[in-house]
Image (cartoon, grey):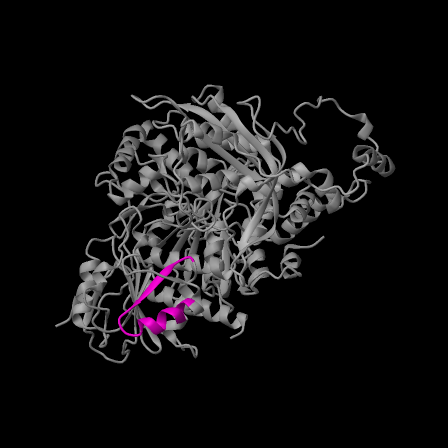
């Protein structure tokens, strides 16, 4: 990929990410490059100034690949700036992710779920959403992310402004849950 | 409302630029070459590299020419250029013991191992106008140079006189010095990548001062030693010279020298009293690009001053010092008051009128 | 002489949007954190730009980090597109990005501003970027950054309230003109940049994303769309916007816009015109069409 094309792609992907963070629960549709949407997003966010870790399956194969593409270094779950999970149950690992301090809550990590399923057409939302950026009645469905996972996120973000910010990535959509969002379950 | 004319702002700016350029060109004198500035106005070039935070003598000379001799503006131009360059890697820590010294003095001891080396200093020149320099005369310049060189044929910027021991180390051996905490390499703060947080680490503090404005550092350091502070410094050692910059060779993984930079380094010693303990000395450290003794000594005094606990004066207050010594920031903000503020002014006016109304009732 | 554009297009080969990609990456990461914690000031490694500190380098770094070829940019200073500083910033951005510039608020995808918010409400497809001189609203009551950071951490805003109270005792009203402190998402007190009080309401539950950046002070913060923004006030001493005492714009006749006051010394009279140049022009054009 030529430098100019890459610069333009990263800018475009970032704008979608920015909009998705500004409007939690809304889906941003992005046409992925041949690298796939996860790598496209990581290429926007990661470089040698920050650290990351991959948890769960594919850790051994993905970490060197991400380092090669982004220059970012690996770190353990508790100190990584970006924590990357395969969508699914992450067990207790999520509790170890750093949430920042009251003086510097921005030091809280960004959690990225990849391989999720985000269905724009599903009319009934499973999860309700409240908080900055969210229009009344907004919800979302992410069938790949287990119920317990979102509960864990809520718990981790319950001491706002401490917390983590989350990006959920499917094949060609992203959805963001900043720590300011309150997630509820629609029965 | 002159300069906020509704249309024509673009023309006004472009014409102002032309008018400014005209000021530099209108004289009848010869055009200045970058070489002339680099060779003959080298202290200005050094200062610009230090405050602009980029070691690049040609570019600093160019900035000085472009800024018509305004060192603040020139440093700013250089800093703005620096910011566009991607970071390609990190050097290994510079060992200033390896400095090729051209000047090295200590005021604390008469005799020091390796000796006092006065080097190129204006300390003892009489500040009298030299009318001999009045005429630009290349032949005379050449003759003067030949006379100075005598029978030296292969002139170099420095002679290899071997490593000189540090004066401070003599005190260290006696156990008289309180050591500053050493920062692990991976914990070094990078002020070009992160905003200073307070209390700032010493690495952040030294970096901020190393690119600080000479006059700003001088003022604060002077205020301390004059009486708004309690540092009574002794100059342990002042060194000027060329220090090798090493990187890890990408292929051999061995240390590899990529060049030398001229720096000035100052270490000051001041008494440090801890209640219930024997008094000891503590150190203040200053370093900057180029030959700039005022800056290095001021920085060393401030480094030591900020270590004083229970800060009473401006120069003891780390946040105060570090937030105000950057010339590019302080200059930019101080001159921004020239920008129109009439929306905010009217908003204030509204409050003032209202307050008068209220008190009039 | 080389113009700024020639210097940039020349052999030195500056990157698209001037900043190198790593600088943009860092700023982008910080923007996302700022959006995630509305009103909280995220420190960042502010870069030097060829425009002086204090002259909009914060806003510029945001704009340069988010702008793309398909954006349409509007730059205003005091509400006006042709103020010299706005012209200068526009000229610089144009030379390093080539993107289309507009004075038309509705056409812009990005608006960079100093001291005003356009009168016409911005939409969900627009982002407004504020140039910020003083990001810390508590600086008025506390000079030390270490201390103001603690106050924000603990949401300990008692000194700010005391300051407002004493202000009322002294002046009979809260006497803050522009830069009126606001509460964002019921958590952080935030400096909205030196916009007039007139513009504060536009930040509350806006449709657009609001990004703020102070280059010299190295802070980024944000108000996402649909976020609660409330000016500080007491129940018996309410926040008040500027009072134009029934004066209208003498060009377009609007009674619903922030006005500039000018003084005609010779005649000894005062005149009022819209501060938002595009709003005024559109009003005028509409009047002509009718």
Specify the farthest residue to the right. Answer: B139
Q: Position of residue C160 (x, y in %)?
A: 28, 37
Specify the farthest residue to the top. Answer: B227
Pick the residue in front: C80 or C75: C75
Quadrant assignment, res C197: top left
Q: In this view, does B278 lie above or below A100?
A: above
B248 horizontally vs A151: left or right = right
* Residue drawn at 49 percent across, 49 percent down: C56
Q: In which quarter of the image is the C terminus of chain A?
A: bottom left
Q: Where is residue B64 in the image (x, y as percent from the top left)?
A: 67, 43
**Quick check: can you spot residue B81?**
yes
Q: In this view, does B122 lie above or below C53?
A: above
* Residue drawn at 35 percent across, 63 percent down: A52
Specify the farthest residue to the left. Answer: A187
The mark total stands at 0
Pick the residue in front: B138 or B281: B281
**Quick check: can you spot residue C277?**
no
Pick the residue in front: C31 or B232: B232
C269 horizontally vs B276: left or right = right
Q: In this view, does A131 lie above or below B269?
A: below
Magenta stretch?
A49-67
Q: Position of residue B21 (x, y in %)?
A: 71, 46
Pick the residue in front: A117 or B92: B92
Q: Position of residue B141 (x, y in %)?
A: 83, 36
B19 horizontally vs C234: left or right = right
Q: Find out whether residue A142 is within the magenta segment.
A: no
């Amino acid at each position: 990929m030529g430098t100019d094309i890459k610069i333009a792609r990263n800018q475009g992907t970032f704008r979608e990410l920015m909009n998705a963070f500004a409007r939690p629960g809304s889906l941003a549709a992005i046409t992925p490059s041949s690298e796939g949407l996860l790598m496209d997003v990581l290429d926007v966010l990661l470089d040698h100034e920050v650290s990351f870790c991959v948890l769960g399956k594919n850790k051994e194969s993905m970490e060197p690949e991400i380092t090669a593409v982004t220059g970012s270094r690996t770190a353990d779950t508790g100190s990584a700036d970006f924590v990357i999970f395969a969508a699914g149950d992450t067990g207790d690992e999520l509790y170890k992710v750093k949430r920042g301090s009251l003086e510097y809550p921005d030091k809280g990590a960004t959690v990225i779920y990849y391989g999720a399923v985000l269905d724009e057409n599903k009319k009934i939302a499973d999860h309700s959403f409240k908080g900055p950026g969210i229009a009344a009645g907004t919800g979302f469905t992410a069938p790949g992310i287990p119920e317990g996972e979102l509960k864990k996120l809520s718990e981790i973000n319950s001491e706002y402004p401490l917390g983590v910010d989350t990006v959920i990535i499917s094949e060609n959509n992203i959805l963001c849950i900043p720590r300011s969002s309150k997630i509820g379950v629609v029965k | 409302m002159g300069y906020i004319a509704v249309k024509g702002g673009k023309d006004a700016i472009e014409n102002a630029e032309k008018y400014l350029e005209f000021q530099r060109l209108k004289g009848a004198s010869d055009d200045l070459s970058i070489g002339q500035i680099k060779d003959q106005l080298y202290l200005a070039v050094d200062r610009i590299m230090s405050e602009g935070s980029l070691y690049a003598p040609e570019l600093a000379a160019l900035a000085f020419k472009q800024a018509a001799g305004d060192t603040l503006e020139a440093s700013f131009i250089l800093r703005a250029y620096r910011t566009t360059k991607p970071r390609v890697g990190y050097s290994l820590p510079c060992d200033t013991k390896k400095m090729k010294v051209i000047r090295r003095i200590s005021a604390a001891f008469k005799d020091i191992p390796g000796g006092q080396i006065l080097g190129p200093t204006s300390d003892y020149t009489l500040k009298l106008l030299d009318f001999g320099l009045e005429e630009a005369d290349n032949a005379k310049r050449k003759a003067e140079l030949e006379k100075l060189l005598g029978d030296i044929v292969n002139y170099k910027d420095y002679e290899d006189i071997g490593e000189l021991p540090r004066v401070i180390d003599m005190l260290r051996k006696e156990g008289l010095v309180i050591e500053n905490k050493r920062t692990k390499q991976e914990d070094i703060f990078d002020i070009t990548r992160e905003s200073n947080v307070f209390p700032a680490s010493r690495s952040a503090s030294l970096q901020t001062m190393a690119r600080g404005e000479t006059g700003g550092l001088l003022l604060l350091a002077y205020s301390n030693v004059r009486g708004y502070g309690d540092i009574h410094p002794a100059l342990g050692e002042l060194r000027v010279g060329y220090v090798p910059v090493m990187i890890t060779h990408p292929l051999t993984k061995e240390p590899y020298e990529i060049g030398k930079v001229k720096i000035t380094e100052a270490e000051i010693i001041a008494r440090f009293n801890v209640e219930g303990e024997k008094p000891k000395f503590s150190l203040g450290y200053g370093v900057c690009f180029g030959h700039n003794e005022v800056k290095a000594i001021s920085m060393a005094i401030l480094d030591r001053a900020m270590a004083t606990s229970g800060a009473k004066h401006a120069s003891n207050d780390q946040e105060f010092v570090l937030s105000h010594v950057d010339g590019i920031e302080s200059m930019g903000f101080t001159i921004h008051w020239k920008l129109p503020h009439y929306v905010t002014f009217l908003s204030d006016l509204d409050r003032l009128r209202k307050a008068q109304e209220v008190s009039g009732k | 002489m080389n113009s700024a554009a020639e210097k940039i297009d020349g052999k030195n080969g500056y990157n698209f949007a001037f900043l190198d990609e790593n600088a943009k990456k860092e700023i982008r990461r910080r923007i996302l954190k700022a959006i995630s914690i509305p009103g909280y000031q995220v420190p960042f490694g502010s870069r030097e730009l060829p425009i002086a500190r204090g002259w909009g380098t914060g806003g510029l770094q945001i704009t340069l980090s988010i702008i793309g070829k398909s954006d349409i940019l509007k730059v205003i200073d005091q509400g006006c597109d042709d103020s010299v500083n706005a012209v200068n910033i526009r000229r610089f951005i144009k030379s390093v990005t080539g993107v289309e510039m507009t004075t038309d608020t509705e056409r812009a995808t990005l608006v960079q501003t100093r001291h005003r918010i356009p009168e016409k409400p911005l939409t969900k497809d627009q982002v407004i970027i504020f140039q910020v001189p003083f990001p810390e609203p508590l600086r008025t009551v506390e000079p030390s950054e270490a201390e103001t950071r603690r106050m924000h951490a603990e949401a300990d805003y008692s000194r700010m309230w005391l300051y407002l109270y004493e202000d009322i005792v002294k002046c009979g009203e809260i006497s803050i003109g522009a830069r009126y402190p606001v509460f964002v998402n019921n958590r952080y007190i935030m400096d909205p940049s030196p916009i007039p009080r007139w513009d504060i309401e536009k930040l509350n539950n806006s449709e657009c994303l609001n990004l703020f950046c102070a280059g010299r002070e190295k802070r980024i913060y944000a108000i996402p769309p649909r976020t609660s923004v409330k000016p500080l006030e007491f129940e018996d001493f309410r926040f008040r916007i500027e009072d134009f005492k029934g004066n209208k714009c003498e060009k377009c006749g609007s009674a619903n816009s922030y006005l500039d006051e000018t003084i005609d010394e010779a005649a000894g009279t005062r005149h009022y015109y819209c501060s938002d140049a595009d709003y005024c022009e559109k009003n005028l054009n509409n009047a002509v069409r009718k």
